[in-house]
Image (tube, coloured by chain):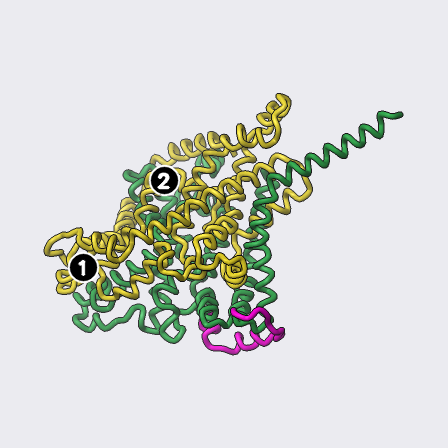
Amino acid sequence: MVQVPVRTINRQQRAQRQFLTILSFLALPLILYTVWVIYPTFQTLLLSVTDWDGLSKTWNYVGAENFNRLFSEDPFRKSIINNILWIIVFITIPPAAGLGLAMVLNTDVKYDRFLKTAYYLPLVLATVVAAVVWAQGIYNPRTGLINTILSLFIGKSAFEIEWLGNPNLAIWSVIAVAVWRQVGYVMILYLAGLKTVDAEVLEAAKMDGAEGWTLFRYMVFPMLAPVTTIVVVISIIDSLRSFDMVNIMTRGNPFDSSNVLANYMYLSFEDYKMGYAASIAVVLFAISLVFIFLYLREVMRQEEAA
Amino acid sequence: MSATVQEMRSIATKKEKKRGVHPVILAIVWIGAFVWLIPIAGAVLTSLRGFDDFNARGFWSIPESLTLDNYVRAWGRMGINRYLLNSFVITIPSLIGCVMLASMCSYALVRFQFKLAKPLYFMFVGGLLLPFQMLLLPVFKLSNDFGIYNTYWALIFFHTAFQLAFSTFVLRNFMKTVPASLFESAMIDGAGEWTIFLRIAFPLMLPGIASLATLEFTWIFNDYLWALVLVTDNALKPITTGLANLRGQFTTDYPLIVAGSILACTPTLIVFFALQRYFIGGLTVGATKG
């Protein structure tokens, strides 16, 4: 009779001790993450409906005013169009090139290590370095590589093409550098994915006479579907995050023709238009949320399969 | 999916494809690789020539003579040495903090069965893809409120916290592959959880930590946005914003700026080439850039 309550106390104590042990591992990381990531996310939502100037201790609630102004202004429209262009390029060219390269380099190609390194080396360079090297070495109207080569064909007029200064060209020039960095990354993801493709299934398909394009189209590509999902989601998120390249190469100029949401947000922050900047961040967040959920769903599915 | 099964499969697929690649496709891959290297090769070449030579002949010409002068000037006069030092002062503590906290977190999320384990894990995974802009204003404000704005600490704290998402994601999945029986037997021997963590779990996580640390080093070292937002004092700037700053000052002296850029990425390149296997491993486990 006496033993029963004692045992419950023990169980309670054990649960309590277990809780404290878990806490001793999780408290520090969770506090840090909450203070610097979770709380800021919610505070930005709040700031987007205020007129905070970045210096004052207080702010006024202004309702949807920031958003109304945002949607009616030209730089915002240009930025969002450029973000969409960026996404369209990013979900087509690097995945196609990366998958193609992975297919080739997954076979017994000679010097495959050199080839792989050549393609993903740009990824290791800081975006600042990549941007500086491209802006000066490739795009510079007077001394850059493109105009130097073009001048061989069309003469001196080639030196007048401003790759970063022409409103019709600037955004494409910036995206090209981003593609240069992205292809190797996608290639690595597909190379890893190809290692998990079931050799026995492929063997069976080959026995049935499938080869070349048919084998790729109906066997390999479908088996790579989970990788493709991840690649597409990451490409979109990276497009929405694109800031460094734009900020360093053009700052969105000329006339916002190469602006993107992330850079537009930063410029508003620099101008101490904090509420306005927050509303741009919220728009970015809202778009990202769709893809964050897609990604989470994929991770959860893999979690259940494991 | 154990590594050995994957390796066996990859060996199997390699044997499968003995037929080889079409020569035209192979040629395209080789040409592409050289095109990919052109900007880097051009930068190295430019950094090795004198300003007058460069100015007279342009970026893409045969240099008259080669010199290390630009590197010497960039290192000392441009202050690349100080910017690089700042980068290390910021990166190393962030890296250590982030790896330590993430390994603790991962251990707890895998080792203990509690209701919040999964939601917490998904919270970190969700945080992986968060747009940085969503955090910019409050982090700027917080660092002001804490009195660490414009110090190394602002960047160290923020990087540690923000990179926890990716680090926990990677290490938690790594922990999952460790058989629980290893911990159970230590439990029976009377070891406490912290002893098990430090003596058994942490050493077992080391391969995962190596991959993670290689990647995180590159990301934190190459960070531009947060350095721009949180540190305005030129003496404290890391290499990324420092370089951007110099580019504004020495606009026309391209060989100098390019030499500075090459010096700027030397540490990450060394880490990358020395630990290439880990770098690739990390990228494919996480499958996301931080």
Question: What color is chain A drawn in?
Answer: green
Please tell me if label 2 and label 1 are on a single chain. Answer: yes
Secondary structure beneath dot 1 equals loop
Question: What color is chain B drawn in?
Answer: yellow
Image quadrant where residue B275 sits = top left
Q: Residue furthest top?
A: B189
Any mark on residue A219, and which? none
Image quadrant where residue A44 sits = bottom right
Secondary structure beneath dot 2 equals helix
Q: Chain of mark 2?
A: B
Kindly tell me whether residue B208 is visible in this rendering.
yes
Q: Chain of mark 1?
A: B
Q: CA distance from mark 2 to mark 1?
A: 31 Å
Residue A67, magenta (yes or no)? yes
Badge 1 amino acid: Trp
| Image position of B89 with respect to B1: above or below | below
Total marks drawn? 2
Q: Residue furthest left?
A: B64
| Image position of A182 with respect to B208: above or below | below
Q: Residue at the location (17% across, 72% down)?
A: A156
Any mark on residue B276, and which? 2
Kindly tell me whether residue A186 is visible in this rendering.
no
* Label 2 with label 1: CB-CB less than 8 Å: no
Q: Residue at the location (28% across, 51% down)?
A: B263
Badge 1: how crowded within 10 Å, few (<14), some, or many (20+)?
some
User: Which one is nearer the viewer's eye here, B288 or A147?
Assistant: B288
Q: Which residues are magenta?
A: A55-79
Badge 2 amino acid: Gln
Indicate the position of residue A23 as horizontal and vertical percent values: 64, 41
Q: Which residue is mark 1?
A: B60
Q: Residue at the location (33% across, 70% down)?
A: A169
Residue A7 horizontal side relative to residue A143, left or right: right
